[in-house]
Amino acid sequence: MATQSKQKKLKGGRQKLKLFRANEPLKSVLMWGINHSLTTLQHMKPRAVLLKDDFKAYLKIKVKGHLFNKENMPSRFKFKEYCPLAFQNLRERFNVDTNDYWESFTRYQPLWDSVSSKSGSKLLVTYNRHYVLKMISSEEVEQMHHFIESYHEFLLYIDIRFSTFD
């Protein structure tokens, strides 16, 4: 008699993605957006000198179409980071550890700060209170684009000037 062996059928499955859970959809999208932004910037080679366009550029991602469904993340939101290369350059120059930065925003949900900014905008603070994130209006975005390049130069000047005292 021939013996029949049972073969297990293997099902292909989707890769498990880290879900950023927060009690508010906005915070979940923020955590996901920062994770996506830092992952994208890791694959880009850092530039020695920033170009003028780097101060006008932005990274905009819609949640819809990024392997997330409505059960996991709200698809009506988008994440927009302004001048990602300029801010990455500042984080590198001021020795902000990328993993610490990533962990601060994505390990636990950020908290609303009880104090709002002078402009009345809401502030989010990371769980470890290392970083503050300000929600800005479209008018403030326009103002930021007018001064961000000169402000970046000023910060680099200050960094160079004070690093000579070490």
Image (cartoon, rainbow, N blue to C red):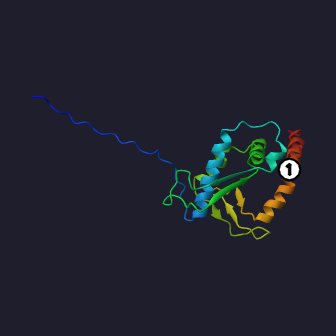
Q: Is residue 146 shown left or right of residue 88?
A: right
Is the N terminus in the top left, top right, bottom left or bottom right quadrant? top left
Q: Residue at x 65, y 46 (%)?
A: 38
User: Could you say which is closer to the camera, residue 4 or residue 137?
Assistant: 4
**For the residue carrying disc 1, how many other residues have a C-alpha within 10 Å: few (<14), some (14-19), or many (20+)?**
some
> Which residue is the extreme one toward the front?
65
Three-letter code for the amino acid on which mark 1 is drawn = Glu
Residue 75 percent coordinates (x, y): 56, 60
Q: Farthest left residue? A: 1
121 relative to 40 in the view: left or right? right
114, above or below 64, in the image: below
**Residue 133 found in image quarter:** bottom right
Circle 1 — which element? helix
Question: Going 63% across and 44% down the picture, which residue do you hit?
Answer: 39
Q: Is residue 149 above or below residue 114?
A: above
Q: Quadrant of the C terminus?
A: top right
Number of labels in the image equals 1
- Residue 57 position, x and y percent, is 77, 49
Q: Is residue 94 left or right of residue 27?
A: right
- Residue 104 spot, x, y in % from top left: 63, 52
Q: Is residue 60 above or below residue 117?
A: above
Q: Which residue is mark 1?
A: 149
Instruction: Indicate left or right for 85 with 65 as reference.
Output: right
Figure check: 110 above or below 66: below
Residue 10 percent location from the top left of the image: 34, 39
Res. 128 image quadrant: bottom right
